Amino acid sequence: MTTPACQLYLISPLDVGGGFPAKLEEALSAAPVAAFQFRVKDVSQHEAARLAEPLQAICAAHDTAFIVNDDMALAKRLGADGVHLGQGDGDPQEARRLLGPGAQIGVTCHDSRHLAMEAGEAGADYVAFGAFFPTTTKAVEHQADPEILTWWQGLFELPCVAIGGITVDNAKALVEAGADFLAVSGGVWAHPEGPAAAVRMFDKLMAG
């Protein structure tokens, strides 16, 4: 088995209730997905845990890593596979102490080489660069250039994730620049042909 050059990393929409578990099942059944990031805002930890439970089970059934966005305590409570930290969400070393040696810890590094090197030194398992394209998921303060992925790949073995406004139509440049993972939200959940079709298209694109 050879490891694919680039893999898909799905990020949840903010609304993960209602029919979303069925959408996730559909997406993960379509083609391999390396990871799923659970990202909810302005809900209690108890409510977040309730929403996460069916999604975590779907990810486990498909061998997809379940990563919690921003919240180390919630990741610990859920026994998640890891946590993704923004720049204001705490230290990777603290997350490692809390979640243990096997947890996947990712750090948002925007368009900063310095932040990425700091995250690597602090023990992160991957660094995330972006946003590469306009996105409706969150306000874009940092615009990254695909060249940062090529630079990172030339110097470090730590995987890098490309994030921000990625769709089937614009992803090719990021794959060619050296992204190990494409973090996608709206490009899958809002795809006109549905999540499964979008995942299959990304899979085909990343396979080259």
Image (cartoon, grey):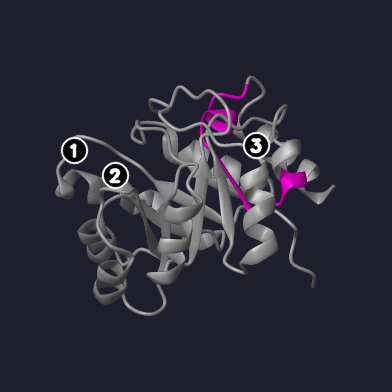
Identify the magenta region.
175-191
Above or below for 150 versus 76 = above
Residue identified by numbered label 2: 51
> Front-most of 117 and 162?
117
Disc 2 from disc 3: Cα separation: 21 Å
Q: Quadrant of residue 63?
A: bottom right
Above or below for 65 versus 166 = below
Residue at image position (70%, 29%) is 170
Amino acid residing under circle 3: Ala
At which x and y percent is residue 158? 57, 66
Q: Earlier in the sequence, mark 2 or mark 3?
A: 2
Q: Is residue 153 visible?
A: yes
Residue identified by numbered label 1: 43
Residue identified by numbered label 3: 196
Disc 1 from disc 3: Cα separation: 28 Å
At which x and y percent is residue 181? 61, 52
Q: Is residue 179 visible?
A: no
Amino acid residing under circle 2: Leu
Above or below for 151 versus 203 = below
At which x and y percent is residue 85? 34, 53
